[in-house]
Amino acid sequence: MKKTAFVLASLLLPLSSAYAAPEVLMVLTSQSELGDTGKATGFWLSEAAHPYQYLTEQGAQVTLASIKGGQTPIDPGSLENQDDASKAFLASQRQALLNTQSLASISTDGYDAIILVGGHGTMWDFRGNSALSQRVSALWQQGGSVAAVCHGVAGLVDVQIDGSPLLDGKKLTGFSNSEEQAIQLTQVVPYSLEDALVADGADYSQGADFTPYVVVDGRLITGQNPMSSEAMAKALWQQIKDK
């Protein structure tokens, strides 16, 4: 009996030891000021916390990075009325958020997916950032999945793949003009995210304001707003769980 158990364990060992957890790179903004309003901004807490909790619970390894590295700012508005996932994320990742890796110092080799977390700060430092564009492009060409939520979708604008826009003809979503107007920041943000996506060739769609809405187009996964964060993560996991 003992010999049989040993043989079975020996047969199972290579399968378990060969399994490598999916690797996900989560990118946060380094922008702490809301334009010239004198108000603070940053990344939106739940947009990082919900995907982080869901993916790590499934077994993924998630690395936090930011545009500049070091401490990444959290939008103070997102610290109000925190749910359990947000509280847990802050408690477990506090030190990591104070000392994030700079995106420029990270290679996409070995990663299965990248997530661009939103928050209004991204409207200033995601679009046109060469380190971010290069890593999105590299991961895409490596066959990885690209996910973004809310204003984080700004990091996909102007990304080129072999000389053509990544977003050309792609179905996606992102924070809408109607949502921006509803929170009275249309005149504060440097551009309209929805309009920029359409101008880049994207097939943009949206759900009802401030309700979960996710669009999947191949390896591109986008969520419209903070309420879409967990649904985006679930769609992403379906793609990377067997890699």
Image (spheres, helix red, strand yellow):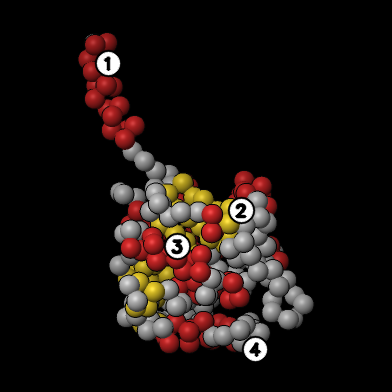
Residue 43 drawn at (x, y percent): 61, 65
Q: Nearer the viewer, mark 1 or mark 3?
A: 3
Label 3 crowd bin: few (<14), some (14–19), many (20+), radius 10 Å: some
Give residue 135's mark: 3
* Marks 2 & 3, CB-CB < 8 Å contact: no
Earlier in the chain: of badge 2 and badge 1, it is 1
Q: Amino acid at mark 1?
A: Phe
Residue 75 makes an appearance in the image: yes
At numbered mark 1, what does the secondary structure look like: helix, strand or loop? helix
- Residue at (33, 58) in percent of width and height: 142
**Gap between marks 2 and 3, in whole Å?**
17 Å
Q: Amino acid at mark 2?
A: Thr
Q: Nearer the viewer, mark 3 or mark 4?
A: 3
Q: Nearer the viewer, mark 2 or mark 1?
A: 2
**222 sits left or right of 84 in the view:** left
Label 1 crowd bin: few (<14), some (14–19), many (20+), radius 10 Å: few
Q: Is residue 104 above or below residue 198?
A: above
**229 sits left or right of 84 in the view:** left
Label 4 crowd bin: few (<14), some (14–19), many (20+), radius 10 Å: few
**Gap between marks 2 and 4, in whole Å?**
31 Å
Earlier in the chain: of badge 2 and badge 3, it is 2
**21 sits left or right of 92 in the view:** left
Q: Nearer the viewer, mark 2 or mark 4?
A: 2
Q: Residue furthest right?
A: 38
Residue 46 drawn at (x, y percent): 58, 62
Observer-nearest residue: 115 or 225? 115
Residue at image mark 4: 187
Give residue 239's mark: none
Earlier in the chain: of badge 1 and badge 3, it is 1
**Which corner quadrant of the image does residue 200 belong to?**
bottom left
**Gap between marks 1 and 3, in whole Å?**
45 Å
Residue 215 drawn at (x, y percent): 38, 72
